[in-house]
Image: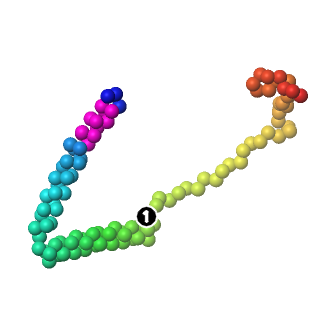
Amino acid sequence: MNLFSKSRAARDAIYNMVWRNPKGRLSAKLRKRCDKLPHNQRLTVIAVMLTAFVLIAFFVFGHACYRIGLGHSQQSLEVEHIRSLELPTLENDVQTVIPTAYDDAGMESED
């Protein structure tokens, strides 16, 4: 067993102990509790939870639309224009490039 498989086994053991086992126990308790509820009461609980979810979703959406209407949804951007570059002119002291008999790799060219 190499070091990689040992570390993977240790990581998996920690993951199971911290996340998977408590999650499984919690879901089992919740499932038992829901199974004990009568059908009408179960429908009532689901309807209340769905109503709360819809109201919260509408509130979040409405608040976002309100902020867009006020103009607070994004910060104002300052436009900065691109400045032109100074290009060399013929009046400036421009050095001419003299081709050599060798290229960049140090090899003599075939010309």
Vertical order, 29 against 21 (above or below): below
Q: Is residue 8 left or right of residue 28?
A: right
Give coordinates of residue 13: x percent, y percent: 24, 39
Q: How is the rendered protein coloured?
A: rainbow
Q: Mark 1 points at which residue?
A: 72
Q: Which of 54 and 111 is in front in this view?
A: 111
Callout 1 amino acid:
His
**Image quadrant in which you'd find residue 103:** top right
**Rendered view: 82 above or below 61:** above
- Residue beneath the point at 16% across and 53% down: 25
How many numbered markers are drawn?
A: 1
Q: Magenta span has 7? A: yes
| Vertical relation: 108 (above or below) 30 | above
The residue at 31%/36% (across/down) is 8
Residue 100 showing in the rendered view: no
Q: Is residue 69 magenta?
A: no
The part of the chain drawn in magenta is 5-15
